[in-house]
Every structure is written in structure tokens, then in C-alpha cells.
Amino acid sequence: MICLKWTKFIERKKAMFISGGALLSAIFTLFFAVSITPLMALLCSLLIGLCGQLKNIPQQTIIQTSVSKEKLPTVYTSLNVIVTGVFGLSSLMMGMLSEWYGIRVVFFLSASMLLLVSVIAYKNKTSFT
């Protein structure tokens, strides 16, 4: 809804939304990791999802505008194969890490990776124009 309402603004500030969405997702993931009440965990989960979408929508826009219509099905198919494979492997690794070190370590690692994404996106913001 936010992206629909402010389409032009988001279009001009894609890099900010990608890096900012990742940064906010990292922050709320940290809050989720240390939450002590179910309500706080639920609120953090909602905010993680919202920030993730604010990051993902501009990313999808970049793909759709930089690839020809004829190649879009191939690009999306390839991306989905990669994402599914990485998701499966990372789920296995995160499961093992949570068994060995506890679930909070997994959330801290996840927040660190989101922070890294945010930094990379910010440093490469000229690529999103």
C-alpha cells in the first residue's frame, strides 16, 4: 500500500529503500532476537516483513526495467532456482547453528547479514538509478 501510494518517490529513491529496508530489517531482527514478550516478537515480525517488502519492491522494479520482456521469464526462473537452492542450504545451516549455539545466535547472524546487505546496497547506490 505504501509503495502504491508513493510510487514516484520510491522510484527516485530505490537505493535508499533497498539499503534502508535491509538496515531496518536488521534492526528489527535484533529486537526480535532479544524480545521477551510474545507481543514484542509479533510486532518485530510485522516490522521485519514490512521493511523487507520496502526493500524487495524496488529490487523487483530494477529487474523488470533492466531486462527485456522476452527474457523476463528466463531471468525469474533462474532467480527462483537460485533462491530455492540457497534457501534450502541456508535453512539446513541455520538449523545446525541453532542446535549447536542456540536460536539467538541465528538471529544475530541474520541481522549481521542484513546489515551487510544494507552496506553493500548503500555503497553501490549509483547502480540503482
Image (cartoon, rainbow, N blue to C red):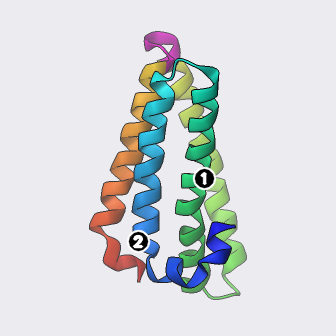
Q: Could you tell me residue 47's position as x and y percent?
A: 57, 45
Q: In this view, does 46 lie to the left or right of 13?
A: right
Please name the residue that numbered disc 2 is placed on.
Answer: 15
Judged left or right of residue 16, residue 8 is: right
In this rendering, the label closer to the viewer, 2 or 1: 1
**For residue 88, above or below residue 3:** above
Extent of the magenta region = 98-103
Disc 2 marks which amino acid?
Ala
Front residue of 39/89: it is: 39
Q: What is the quadrant of residue 80 in the picture?
A: bottom right
Q: What element carries label 1?
A: helix
Q: Which residue is drawn at 65% across and 47% down?
A: 84
- Quarter containing the N terminus: bottom right
Q: Examine the structure image and report whether residue 28 is included in the region drawn in magenta.
A: no
Residue 98 pos. (x, y %): 51, 17
Tell me where residue 2 appears, x and y as whole percent. Answer: 63, 68
